[in-house]
Image (spheres, coloured by chain):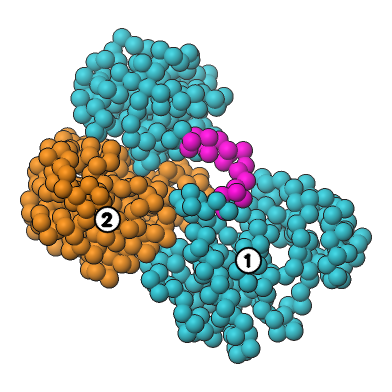
Chain colours: A cyan, B orange
């Protein structure tokens, strides 16, 4: 789950991490009001959206007068950045930057731990630095049973800063950011850039945090900040029914049990010349209610012209699945052709039950997919 | 032989009195696994499905000689369950539960390492050494005894691949689902090494998916260290960037973790990649 920069900075402040003072505004007047109250001649107006690359898109501007604040606020509010509409901006104090750094904590799959990532190449896209100059990136894996004792924070700080005065400020910052990361079940806590001002102060200029969806049940304060976009709302709605759903742009709606098999189904549709309309994992069981809900979800997409049901019957027997499907389709009225592929335990019995129904039943995944692609193409013509 | 589990596996089921734990304990016992104990704090002394229930995993180890644990407890209790098992004297822990907070896994895995105990999962279907032992939720009947090792990040996709192998007469030595989360226990490198050293495994199938770079590392490892034939399959060629595809770990982030990077890495390492699961038996036979 993602949050906005100003929300990340609120967390930073809660954990005593110094940030450039700023206030979130939803209209031009409050931007002007904030400008007056910040007592800072120079301010930065920053779009608050759930995506990176705001600067390049023109969503971050420096203003040095009320006129400029008005001009930039008017331009940025309402702007579209990578499909995200800007409905609020942050008006933040300008800072005299002497040098910029990168600092983050992130979950690292390989070391199976949280890693501290630092670089003197602050303000840059860190993935780009990692790709072009990996030697400029410092990585320290954190032992979860020990955390970050002072000596470790100091060791890290000395790797990044030359001045002992700055190191002394960095030690608690590193420890507090790690504390924030673990206490909120984050998956990313990033400060980019972290700056040393001309006055010698260490300040977070930008902040970004992502959180572990699996842990939201115990992070009500984080969950309260969830602002799903239209796609995410649909995915969330599907999730509440026990599904995992991602909308795509094709014509063949897929209903599959298991995430890996669902991905493989989409891939094969493409391989056979069709276009998958979605990813949908309906989970382990395939009871009639679940099938009904899944069909409603798939057919709510006007693009879908064929539905492919690909079920690998493991512990659930195929004859039970077939009975469930027949039961479910008593309540579903649709003229969209449905291709069903059942494989696994009692598959012959399952297919026997589907004989004489309006379903197109197929024995293998290849057969089911070529049938679906053929039906989908014939319905376009 | 086989790897990790066999006829000597003595299994304790953590959460045996729960719905899933009970259901699968019965299925595993039916398959022939030595399910020697279950645990459920406060229900020690009772029996579930005729299997003795203990208050702790340590009791199951002392009284029934359990050496492997499988975990079915709900996600909020998984960290503690893994740590309890790691502390009890079992040598292998398999965690089936999905939806476990990542930082809980990070901590529990570290503790298991400290105790010298191997962890598989969480969010995995478990493993099977056909004809010997089944630990987890895989459907035993689709497997066949044989000499091909299977490693996968997925559940039903593994069944699909195994089903194709079995239909073609290719049996399996051991098949393992490592789990779909970003942080899990045993992974490709450790398991490839085990299969390489297993005299009863002749070839290996690796089923990967988008997210992370474990497949790229596996490709390099195979090139450097594996002498047995390997065939691979990668799911998620059509997955859009930035979207989680069911598994918490199956996500293309910042443009990396794509299926193409992974298939390219395998191609570079000389490992054939199937474009659909049904091709895997032929890819193995051709080597």
Q: Residue at x 74, y 84 (%)?
A: A199
Residue A208 horizontal/vertical position (percent): 61, 61
What are the residue bounds of the magenta stretch?
Answer: A222-240
Q: Which residue does the image show at 62% across and 38% down from the upper left?
A: A230
Q: Which residue is mark 2?
A: B120
Left or right of residue A329, residue B140 in this image:
left
The label shown at residue A1 is: none
Q: Which chain is mark 1 on? A: A
Describe the element under mark 2 as helix, strand or loop.
strand
Is residue A22 highlighted in magenta?
Answer: no
Choose between A203 and B203: the one closer to the eye: A203
Q: Relative to residue B171, is residue A31 drawn left or right?
A: right
Residue at x 72%, y 80% (from the top left corner): A197
Q: Chain of mark 2?
A: B
To the question of a shared chain for discs 1 and 2, the answer is no
* Image x and y of residue A279, in percent: 45, 37
């Amino acid at each position: 789950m993602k949050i906005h920069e100003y929300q990340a900075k609120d967390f930073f402040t809660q954990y005593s991490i110094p940030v450039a003072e700023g206030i979130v505004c939803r209209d031009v007047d409050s931007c002007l009001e904030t400008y007056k109250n910040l007592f800072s001649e120079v301010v930065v107006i920053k779009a608050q959206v759930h995506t990176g690359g705001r600067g390049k898109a023109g969503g971050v501007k420096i203003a040095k007068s009320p006129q400029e604040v008005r001009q930039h606020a008017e331009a940025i509010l309402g702007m579209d950045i990578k499909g995200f509409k800007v409905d609020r901006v942050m008006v933040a104090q300008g800072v005299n930057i002497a040098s910029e750094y990168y600092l983050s904590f992130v979950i690292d799959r390989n070391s199976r731990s949280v890693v501290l990532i630092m670089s003197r190449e602050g303000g840059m896209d860190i993935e780009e630095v990692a790709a072009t100059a990996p030697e400029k990136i410092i990585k320290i894996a954190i032992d979860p049973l020990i955390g970050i004792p002072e000596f470790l924070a100091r060791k890290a700080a000395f790797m990044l800063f030359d001045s002992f005065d700055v190191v002394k400020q960095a030690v608690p910052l590193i420890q507090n950011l790690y504390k924030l990361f673990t206490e909120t079940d984050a998956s990313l806590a990033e400060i980019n850039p972290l700056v040393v001002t001309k006055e010698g102060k260490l300040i977070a200029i930008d902040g970004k945090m992502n959180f572990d969806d699996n842990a939201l049940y115990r992070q009500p304060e984080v969950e309260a900040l969830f602002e799903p976009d239209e796609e995410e709302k649909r995915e969330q709605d599907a999730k509440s029914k026990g599904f995992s759903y991602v909308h795509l742009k094709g014509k063949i709606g897929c209903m599959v049990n298991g995430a890996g098999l669902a991905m493989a189904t989409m891939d094969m549709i493409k391989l056979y010349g069709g276009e998958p309309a979605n990813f949908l994992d309906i989970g382990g069981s395939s009871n009639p209610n679940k099938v009904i809900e899944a069909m409603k979800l798939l057919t709510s997409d006007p693009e879908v012209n064929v539905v492919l049901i690909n079920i690998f019957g493991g512990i659930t027997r195929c004859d039970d699945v077939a009975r469930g499907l027949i039961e479910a389709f008593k309540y579903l009225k649709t003229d969209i052709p449905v291709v069903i592929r059942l494989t696994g335990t009692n598959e012959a019995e399952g297919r026997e039950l589907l004989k004489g129904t309006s379903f197109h039943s197929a024995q293998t995944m290849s057969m089911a997919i070529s049938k679906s692609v053929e039906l989908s193409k014939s319905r376009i013509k | 032989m086989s790897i990790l589990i066999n006829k000597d596996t003595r299994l304790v089921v953590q959460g045996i009195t729960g719905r899933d734990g009970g259901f699968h304990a019965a299925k595993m016992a039916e398959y022939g696994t030595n399910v020697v104990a279950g645990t459920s704090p406060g229900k020690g002394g009772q029996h579930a499905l005729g299997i003795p229930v203990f208050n702790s995993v340590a009791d199951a180890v002392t009284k029934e000689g359990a050496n492997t644990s499988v975990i079915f407890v709900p996600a909020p209790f998984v960290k503690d369950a893994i740590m309890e098992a790691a502390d009890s004297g079992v040598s292998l822990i398999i965690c089936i539960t999905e939806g476990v907070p990542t930082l809980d896994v990070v901590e529990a895995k570290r503790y298991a390492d400290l105790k010298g105990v191997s962890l598989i999962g969480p969010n995995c279907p478990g493993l099977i050494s056909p004809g010997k032992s089944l630990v987890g939720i895989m459907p035993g009947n689709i497997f066949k005894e044989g000499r091909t090792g299977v490693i996968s990040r997925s559940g039903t996709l593994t069944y699909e691949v195994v089903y194709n192998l079995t239909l073609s007469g290719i049996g399996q030595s051991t098949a393992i689902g490592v789990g779909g989360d970003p942080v899990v226990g045993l992974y490709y490198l450790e398991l490839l090494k085990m299969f390489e050293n297993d005299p009863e495994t002749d070839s290996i199938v690796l089923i990967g998916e988008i997210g992370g770079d474990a497949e790229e590392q596996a490709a390099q490892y195979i090139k450097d260290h594996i002498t047995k034939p390997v065939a691979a399959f990668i799911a998620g060629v059509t997955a859009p960037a930035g979207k989680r595809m069911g598994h918490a770990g199956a996500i293309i982030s910042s443009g990396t973790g794509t299926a193409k990077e992974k298939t390219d890495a395998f191609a570079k390492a000389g490992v054939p990649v199937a474009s659909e699961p049904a091709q895997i038996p032929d890819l193995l036979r051709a080597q």
